[in-house]
Image: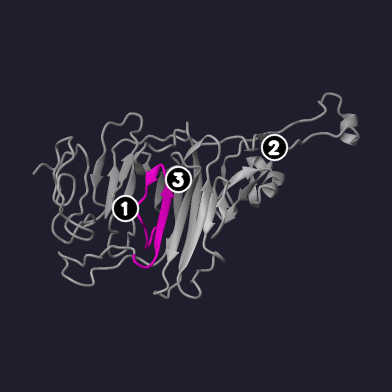
Amino acid sequence: MELHVEVDTVICANHSVSGAYSDNGTSYNEDIGFSPNSRSYRKSKFFPLFTIIRFTNEVCKTTNEEGGICYTRKQCTLLGGTSHGSCAQGLGVCCQFQATCGAIITQNGTLFRNPNFPQKYQPSGGSDVCQVRIRKPQNVCQLRLNFIKFDVEGPLGPSSGTANQPSQDAGMCKNDALSITSSGATVPQLCGQLGGQHMYVDFGTSDTITMNLMLGGNVQRDREWSVEVVTIPCNSISRAPVGCLQYFTGVSGQVESFNNPGSIHLANQDYSICVRMEDGMRSIEWSGCQPAAVRISGPTPLQTNVGNTQQPTCPGGPGNTGGSAGSAGDYLIIMGGIQYPQQ
């Protein structure tokens, strides 16, 4: 399933989230200036004893165009990162943090990757479970997970039945499956191809969020993943509203179902996609990215129920008890929509 978001007015706005570096309440700074015993100091009559240069720990791009955080070289080393290029007009280094199975993630911008990345990974000796835990920093309420690369075994297809009545297990993640556990959000189980996707997860009352990637031993294939973990402060304008698994900003964009361009969308996906209303905007136009881009429960035409602000009644959806995973109970709701052209 693909949807295209488009409006007829273009507004450009830049924003960023940054904060001072601290560790257990202790601030770290590096002083750059003159030493009292240096020749430069003795000749400099109008300079203070030290010139302290500070810069915010903002997101930066490494030399290989991946994400990092701008720190001094000393800070990067102390935090366990590796420097890849410079930032802050050459005063800092773009520091990258990586984690793999069994790690506890504490740094913003950490890349959760398969073992031996960038080489692909295949479990040895059957099935495997790769787990990481993400610890909640102070004044942070939410995570954004950016799936830079993610390719594991996809869901079961309609191997039995017909196109209109596929197997009851169609769309289920039976071999590989990604599960995310948090007290603040319900995240559907995912598998297949997720590159380019994102999701927001609230910490809620928990101080950790757990990611479990279960890799089945019944399928002999290579897997690879690289997921960026971005922390969202509680007062940030980038924080997604409560209940939004995906959150889009800007005046245009593209929304896709998980496992697209896989052959089938995932089962048991019950989540909300939200779009921020930008300044000067008052409506959103939705259209398919290409013919037949929006297909739910087989090739029959998508049934529409638009023009009211109440949650419509769909087969197997709200107001009904019928339908099961992979059956005609799949539905897509756009609240308050007006169909155009009018039928």
Amino acid tagged 2: Tyr
Tag on residue 28? 2
Contact between marks 3 and 2 (CB within 8 A): the answer is no
Judged from the image, the secondary structure of the residue bearing numbered disc 2 is loop
* Label 2 Cα neighbours within 10 Å, binned few <14 / some 14-19 / many ≥20: few
What is the quadrant of the N terminus in the image?
bottom left
Residue 126 on the magenta span: no
Residue farthest to the top? 46
Amino acid tagged 1: Glu
Q: In which quarter of the image is residue 192?
A: bottom left
In this picture, is 190 found above or below 313?
below
Residue 97, how many percent across, how many down? 59, 52
Foreground tag (3 vs 1): 3
Residue identifier under label 1:
256
Secondary structure mainly formed by the magenta segment? loop
Residue 69, how many percent across, how many down? 59, 45
Q: Which residues lie in the magenta part? A: 174-194
Judged from the image, the secondary structure of the residue bearing numbered disc 1 is strand
Q: How many marks?
A: 3
